Amino acid sequence: MTVGQQHSVIFTPSGVRSFAALGETVYETALRAGVDMRSICGGKGLCKRCQIEVESGTHAKYQITVGDDCLSSPDSVELEAMDRGRLTPKRRLACRAKIRGDVIVEIPSDSREVISSIRKASSFIDAKLNPVVKIYMCQLPLPTLDDNPCDADGLVKALMDFGLTVTLDPAVLVKLQPTLSANNRTIIAVVRGGAIVVDVRAPDDGGLYGAAIDIGSTSLAVYVYDLISGHLVYENAAMNPQIKFGEDLMSRVSYVMMNKGGDARLTTAIRTEITQMVQEAADTLAVPMEHFMELVMVGNPIMHHLFFGISPVELGQAPFTLAVKDWISMPAGGLAMGLNAAAQISFLPLIGGHVGADMAGAYLTQMDAMAGRSVLLVDIGTNAEILLTHKGRVVAASSPTGPAFEGAEISAGVRASKGAIERIRIKDDHTTQFKIIGHEAWLDDGKDDLSAHNITGICGSGIFEVMVELANNGLIDESGLFVPTKAPDRFVPEGKTWKYLLVDHPKNKIFIKQTDVRAVQLAKAALNAGVSLLTDYLECDAVEEVLLAGAFGTHLDSTYVADIGIIPKVKATQIKAVGNAAGMGAAMALLDQDAQTRIIQAVQKIERLETATEAKFQKYFVDAMAFPTAPRANIDENRNKRRRRRPSINVEKEQ
């Protein structure tokens, strides 16, 4: 509805309503109304990114009629853009279209400055789009003799129109005048932190990308974002090449200690792999590596130190002294990774000891959900990292679980790859139903012909379920010892002990050995003891929720997590998987410089507990060795029959 010389303007899909004076541009109205709209030229008609759509007619939903003359006619800038195919006839440029009547403005998805939704498995995080590096398009006036011309000053002055007060990195001066000369004085300035021009480009060279990288001890994950739109445009994972130097973290530290130049080899391996992953992303997206201007990383302290070329030896022995734990940012030029010399590589802060930037990243994603509550955040790995919030305090610790949960100390243990058993049920007749990675349907070794399936072993989630199933079926007692009388047809003697036939495959029989049970007991007891120490430290009688972070935690069934006893006094309904929260934390810091500030400040307030020196650790560790759902040792057969059971899977129904 027109009021005097003002016209009603409604922006969709947001539904924001505003009024505009006659002759005001749609872009000016959007800025005043707080409507997000893409533009890197400040509304000068240079970048052609603030595209809008307007449909005339009566819109009953908004009770408004939009006339054909609601906007000014396309001007020369828009007509030229249409001729060059940069603007369709149905679209207008918001910075050129002047308002002449009531109007409903549709902002297409490709014209919005979006809030990025980061989704990985069960995680979902909203990140504001406010990266530390941004681009701006400027057109500098032609210099004259009377001006005492200086192109650096001209660029600084042009950027003042965006509200920026900047200086130029000296390296930019080499490119500045040739770029201006070749592009009719129009240029894209790449500005870091709103203060330093770190690069200049031709006006048609405006891509801007960043990568969030999770450096895990076993695998690497790379998430590539368009820093202009905020969209996740590429993701990939790869094995950490350092594995060839040691399966777990301490073995890699030992390699460094025992081999001259070992730290340099580990550093070269990880940098080379990350370079290849970013190059693969650039090739897939068909963009030059020069457009990658920001890499933000997370990882445990040893991965952090090795990436930066810092010896991890001090982290291999008490008191586990870090070389540095603050947020680190450094130019990419000195790392020989093929990136733009002006690109920056950053690492989230370490919390302390063996609690790293991966836990800091995970905490960043869950900080709001954990605030004011008693919540446990756990990342299960070869060295479990745990963080507890309670009554406004936050404490973190690590616990030496070892690689058993990932299959490294299990006789039939394998990585989570095709053919690995990931879920399993033991039936009343002790045959098994199970699922393998790469095959959707459940298999049954009592009914199905397994010869057509390549079953490689048991991966982490399967190991959890196997141990609980053995306990629930009375095949191990509370102490973890086998009870061979419960299934004489499945137990096979092995020296002075036994092994249990889990899957009767004709070519590759899968056994569980007594040593496997012990390895899991040690791992679960270490994590349970660490959690108990944290709850003691903050005088927390009970946690409200347990958040499982990491790719491994995502694949765990909460019922089995509760039953195996890695977290004291929690029910399955209190356990929630939050996906690769560490990697998502890196993504949040990549997309939003305010998130960087937030996690830097938050980490400074986290208290750290060193579990290895706590007097109660050994007691809690011993107490947590028991399997909660298993029968007690030497229990009579009648009570065995009343043990806790979980129904077997109805294979036909699931299929």
Image: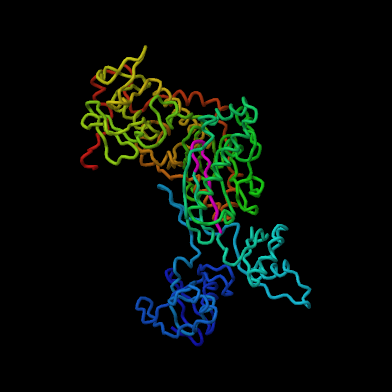
Which percent across, then down, holds residue 76?
54, 81
Which percent across, then down, holds residue 142?
70, 75
User: What is the span of residues highlighted in magenta in the rendered image?
Assistant: 208-220
Identify the residue at image location x=53%, y=71%.
Answer: 48
Most extreme residue toward the bottom, as rendered? 4
Q: Is 326 situated left or right of 649 in this image?
A: right
Identify the residue at image location x=29%, y=17%.
Answer: 484
Figure disc tally = 0
- Could you tell me if residue 371 is visible in this image? no
- Could you tell me if residue 542 is visible in this image? yes
Residue closest to the eye, 217 or 147: 147
Q: Is 524 situated left or right of 177 in this image?
A: left
Which percent across, then down, holds residue 627?
37, 26
Q: Compared with residue 384, is residue 140 higher up or lower down, i.e. above or below?
A: below
Instruction: Confirm whether the magenta stretch covers residue 223.
Output: no
- Which quadrant does the N terminus fall into? bottom left
Identify the residue at image location x=75%, y=69%.
Answer: 150
Q: Is 318 situated left or right of 1 in this image?
A: right
Residue closest to the eye, 118 or 444: 444
Please identify the quarter of the rendering in which residue 442 is found: top left
Residue closest to the eye, 532 or 190: 190
